Amino acid sequence: MHQAGHELGSHTYKHEKVYDQTPAQFREEVKRTRHAIENITGKKIVTHRSPFFSITSKSLWALDVLAEEGFAIDCSISPIKTWRYGIATCPDTIFKIKENNLIEFPVSRFKFLHKQLGIGGAYFRLFPYSFTGNSLRQRQHDKLPNMFYIHPWEYDPLHPSVGLNWKSKITHYTNLSTTLARTERMLNEFKFVTVSDYIDQYAKQQPIITIPVANLQD
């Protein structure tokens, strides 16, 4: 993946929710992951995304940990408030944390029937492809950044079924067989770059806004 030109980032080692960890546990997770990837690629890792978008108002301390550990970019915050994650006051654009200069690239969202939905993941599978395609185009038109996300297991409709609560089962297993074809269509319709390259391009076109971490409270 690295040799093919993809940017590899930290997603932690054990895939635990940040708000269920202590700062010391989280620090060890990102350090261990970063060292593992850097040892393989020989390139410094500067980006991070926490499992389940679990940097929420309960775990904002994690942003300082990331900055202290040398990360420049985080993609862990969702402006879509759900039962599992999200900060409703999160800006719908790229921004910088005032206290530590960490750049945040949050989940991209779109509105449907007064609901805020995300571009990627379960939303990509649960709703028709047109929801994603039209939302990407609308955000481009509005000069808003686009962040698409997906998990490797979402391309494997035959992966084992495990015990989950009903909400998790719906979001995890629905329409897995559609992911590959929809992704191929999207890649034919849109151009994608790495997170770091996109932020570099974005910063040349307009200043990145800076907000205090206190603004990220529900």
Image (cartoon, helix red, strand yellow):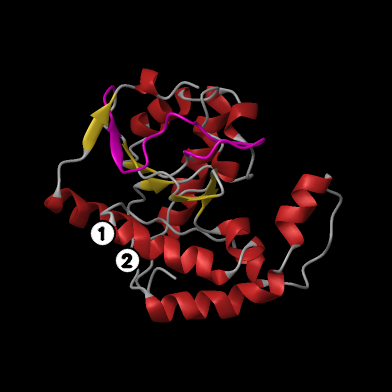
Residue 148 locus on image (x, y percent): 45, 59
Residue labelled with disc 1: 197
Decide whether residue 89 is among the magenta residues. Answer: yes
Q: Quadrant of the N terminus?
A: bottom left
Decide whether residue 164 is among the magenta residues. Answer: no
Q: Quadrant of residue 102?
A: top left
Could you tell whether 196 is left or right of 166 in the image? left
Residue at (71, 68) in percent of width and height:
175
C-beta proximity under 8 Å, tags 1 and 2 = yes
User: Dot 1 lies on which element?
Assistant: helix
Outermost top residue = 214
Mark 2: give few (<14), some (14-19) or many (20+) Cα within 10 Å.
few
Res. 201 in view: yes
Residue 211 locus on image (x, y percent): 28, 26
Residue labelled with disc 2: 193
Residue at (54, 35) in percent of width and height:
86
69 or 6, which lies in front?
6
Q: Eyeballing the image, is 41 above or below 102?
A: below
Q: Eyeballing the image, is 184 above or below 198?
A: below
Query: As shown in the figure, which amino acid type bears the numbered disc 1?
Result: Asp
Residue stretch in magenta: 79-99
46 or 125, which lies in front?
125
Q: Quadrant of residue 160?
A: bottom right
Mark 1: give few (<14), some (14-19) or many (20+) Cα within 10 Å.
few
Q: Eyeballing the image, is 113 above or below 159?
A: above
Res. 43 in view: no
72 or 92, which lies in front?
92
Q: Main secondary structure of the magenta part?
A: loop
Residue 206 locus on image (x, y percent): 15, 47
Residue at (34, 71) in percent of width and height:
5
Query: As shown in the figure, which amino acid type bears the numbered disc 2?
Result: Val
